[in-house]
Image (spheres, rainbow, N blue to C red):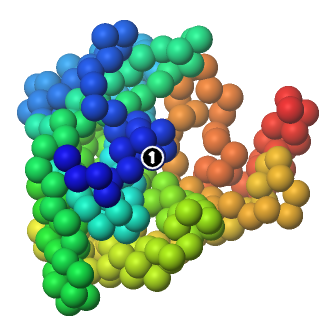
Amino acid sequence: MDKNINWKFLETEYGLIDQIRRDAVKRCSLSDLVERETAYSFTQELMPLIGTKYPEVVATHFTSWFGAVCAGLQAMVSLFDVVSEVRLEHLTFQLHMDENQRKISFAHKRTKVTKAPEEEGLRNEWRSQIYDHFYANEVKPIIKSLSAVAEISENHLWAQFATRLHNEKDKWLAHDLFLARRQTINNDFYALLKDLDLTRLELKSNPFDVSFKWIEDATVPDKQIRQRSTCCLAYKRSNHPGHCYSCPRMSAEEREIKKQLIQTQG
């Protein structure tokens, strides 16, 4: 396996591990979720584990978790210039509990790797092929399957990725370890926003090329954070206190009350 990929970074940041967890309370090969019957059973089994009776909540939460895999792929491209095959048949979703906290990971079978060409034009072509294959052949089938069984729009599920990917890009740009990669990070992210083959994705617009509203951080003075591009439906979970702080469905008045509550709770 190519040493240029920092697997420890991918494990820590995105839960892309190389082993099956024996303590997982729920495990599923992602390739199986393309089958509607399996996807339906998956959502039904996951509902009590996340405290909801609504299958669409499982769909949004799973898609949000799967955003870690998307971010991991983007990191391989932009930070390491080497990509391991990220295919559904090589990924297993795992949920385990750690001190009553839900933890998500994806067991990733590390197989074939491809290294980016050094010449800029060839690298751009290499990058486009990776993006188009991953989002059309690996992501789209899961989106379609979960959308069908949970009766939620595909666009709503695609939108779950956007905020995470933009935030991860900003983290990399601010990280001292990746100072020399800033131009590459920006170029690769611009390509993700502008160059995806929307025909293959069966989309009218790029789900990542969105404008965000910026809001005050709930706990850090003078810090601005992105408002989520769409609601994750967490308010439909029995153990969740209403809308998330960054939810676009909250009014300014509701968000101010939420911020005060968060600050009071410490």
| Closer to the camera in the image, 157 or 251 | 157
Q: Mark 1 is on which residue type?
A: Phe
**Label 1: how many residues lie within 10 Å, few (<14), some (14-19) or many (20+)?**
few
| Closer to the camera in the image, 123 or 238 | 123
Report the residue at 19% width, 66% height from top: 115
Q: Is residue 246 visible?
A: yes
Picture coordinates of residue 211 (x, y %)? 53, 74
Picture coordinates of residue 118 (x, y %)? 23, 81
Residue 116 picture quarter: bottom left
- Above or below: residue 108 compared with residue 113: above
In this rendering, position of residue 110 left or right of residue 209: left
Reading the image, the residue beneath label 1 is: 9
In this rendering, position of residue 246 left or right of residue 14: right
Picture coordinates of residue 134 (x, y %)? 19, 58
Q: Secondary structure at mark 1?
A: helix
Picture coordinates of residue 213 (x, y %)? 64, 69
